[in-house]
Amino acid sequence: MGFAISWLAVRNNNDSSVLASLGLEKTGETEEFPGKHWCSTRVGEWTVVWSDSYEPARFCGAPSKLRGEVVICDVEEHVMFASTSAFNDGTMIWRIVHDAQQAQDHLAIKGTPPESLVRVRAEQFARVSEDREVDFIFDIPIRMAKELIGFRYDEEYGSVFDILRVTKPRWKFW
C-alpha cells in the first residue's frame, strides 16, 4: 500500500473561509491522523486541507479562489510522483515535480523556489549515491512543502484533524 493524496495549505487566520471557498465544512468530528476523504488542521498560520484523493477536482482553481499564499502538495507513492506548488494571489510562484516514470532522477523546477531548495536537493542527491535502490529524489518536493508549512503527509503532527464534508450544492434556477 502507499499514499495517493493531495493537501492544500493557505496562510490565513480564518479556516472557515478557506473551507467555504472549497465547498467544505466541518462535521464536528475529529481524528488524530487524516483518514477520511476530507479533513483539515491548523499548522501555525496555515490551514491545511487534506484529501485522500490524488489531485482532487476540488483543488483545481483553488489558488485563484483563495487569496494570499497557497501551497499544494500532490503525492502518488504507487508511481513515485510528488509535486509541490506555491502560489500568491492566484499566480504560481514556483513548482517542483519528481516523476519517477520519466526518470529515476527526474526533477522539474519552474519559477523561483525558496533558496533552501539548493540544500535539500544536494542532501537528497547525496543520499542517492549511497543507495541507488531508494528513490530519494521523490522526497525533494515533499521536504520543500514541509519546510514552508511544517506539515508532512506521512508524519504524525500532534494535533487533531477536523473531519470535513462537502457542503450541499445550492440550486440555482435561472
Image: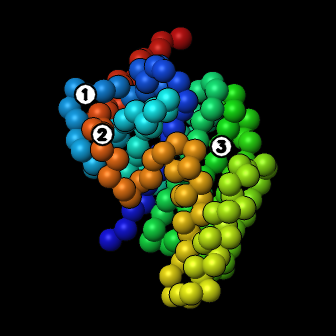
Contact (Cβ within 8 Å) of mark 3 with mark 1: no
Q: Which mark is residue 27?
A: 1
Q: Which of the labelled discs sits on residue 159, or is there none? A: 2
Side of 32 relative to 61 (left or right): left
Q: Amino acid at mark 1?
A: Thr
Q: Position of residue 45 (x, y in %)?
A: 50, 29
Vertical placement of 148 versus 131: above or below? above
Q: Which of the 4 image quadrants contains residue 161? A: top left
Task: Please name the amino acid that badge 3 sits on.
Answer: Ala
The image shows residue 92, relative to residue 124, as above or below, that is above
First along the sequence among labels 3 and 1: 1
Q: Going 28% across and 48% down the picture, which residue do you hit?
A: 33
* Mark closer to the observer (3, 1): 3
Residue underneath mark 3: 86
Mark 1 neighbour density, 10 Å: few (under 14) some (14–19) many (20 or more): few
| Residue in the image at 22% along x and 41% along y | 31
Asked whether residue 101 appears in the rendered view, the answer is no
- The residue tagged with tag 2: helix, strand or loop? loop
**Of the residues tagged 3 and 2, which is closer to the observer?**
2
> Where does residue 152 sit, x and y in percent of width and height?
44, 52
Mark 3, secondary structure of its residue: strand
Of the image marks 2 and 1, the number of the one nearer the N terminus = 1
Q: Amino acid at mark 2?
A: Ser
Question: In the picture, which quadrant includes the N terminus?
Answer: bottom left
Cβ atoms at labels 3 and 2 below 8 Å apart: no
Residue 19 location (% of width, % of height): 43, 26
The Cα atoms of the two marked residues, 2 and 1, are separated by 17 Å
Is residue 148 in sight in this rendering? yes
Q: Residue furthest right?
A: 111
Q: For mark 1, give the secondary structure.
A: strand
